[in-house]
Image (cartoon, helix red, strand yellow):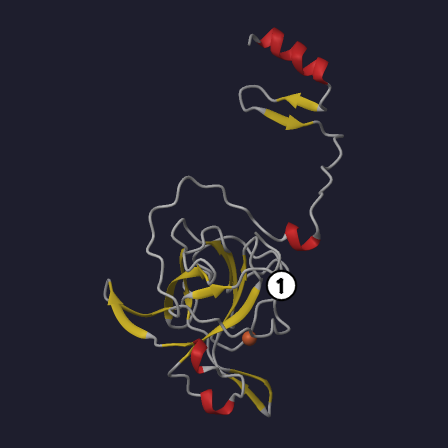
Amino acid sequence: MTDLKRRKFLKQTGLGLAAAGSAGLILRADARPTLSSLSDTEAERVLIQMGPQPKETVLAKGELKKITPMPYGPFYKQGAPFRAKICPPFEPGTPFVMTGRVWAIDTRRPLPGVVLDLWHVDHEGKYSSGDGDFKNRGRLVTTETGYYEFESVRPIPYQPNPNFWRCAHFHVLAVCPGYKTLVTEIQFQDDPKREMDSMFQPSLAVAAEQKVMNGRKFETAVFDIVLERESGAK
Ligand SMILES: [Fe+2]
């Protein structure tokens, strides 16, 4: 289409679009925002369109166990950036790399395109405000094989009040269309405060492994997430 024909076409379609040279099209300055037809719950979901999935082993029956849900707690904030390193550069603390996969309990296959929302305390046991300061907060999306990986610093136990200890944990929110939203925590088997926290769940506790790379120490662990089908979802 020549430039002249293209301009004529845009004028005739009356779509409220303005030509932006070779960069494509942008909305006219006075264009009204697109109205969303999604419910609040649906709007929180991100659908990833991908090509055919690689062949995956279907796990045997009984290999996947439901994940114990945990409360959001008071420090969850929406809108964390999408990134796989969720602490800032040179954040004090023990560098930590978490890996795992998200599985569907009904098909026993990995789930791609699951949004994981993560948040945790810093080395002083404090959460960031989450209103622009998203330190130690981040979201990521599972791959075609349901795999995820993120780096941060290992959270420490903290005291919400003088009479109560929380064992160290990463908060995790997992959202996937057709599956029940899961909120849970990743805790640590070697947590020094596990005996003092009634919310400590052995089934959620990972075995942290110490490693050295490039002469620097860090810890790593694996945590798989299992989601249940939403009732009525096909
Ligand atoms: Fe917490």
Q: What element carries label 1?
A: loop
Query: Is ligand 1 less than 8 Å from the beta carbon at label 1?
Result: no
Residue 36 drawn above or below residue 98: above
- Residue at image position (36%, 57%) is 58
Q: Nearer the viewer, residue 133 or 149?
A: 149
Which image quadrant for residue 220? bottom left
- Residue at image position (71%, 14%) is 11
Q: Nearer the viewer, residue 60 or 164?
A: 60
Q: Quadrant of ligand 1?
A: bottom right
Which image quadrant for residue 225? bottom left
Q: In which quarter of the image is the N terminus?
A: top right
Q: Where is residue 43 in the image (x, y as percent from the top left)?
A: 65, 50
Q: What residue type is labelled 1?
A: Lys
Answer yes or no: is residue 51 visible: yes
Q: Where is residue 38 in the image (x, y as percent from the top left)?
A: 69, 47
Badge 1: how crowded within 10 Å, few (<14), some, or many (20+)? some
Q: Which of 229 and 46 is in front in this view?
A: 229
Q: Where is residue 227 in the image (x, y as percent from the top left)?
A: 50, 63
On screen, residue 5 versus residue 39, left or right, reads left
Q: Where is residue 44 in the image (x, y as percent from the top left)?
A: 62, 53
Report which residue position mark 1 lands on. Answer: 77
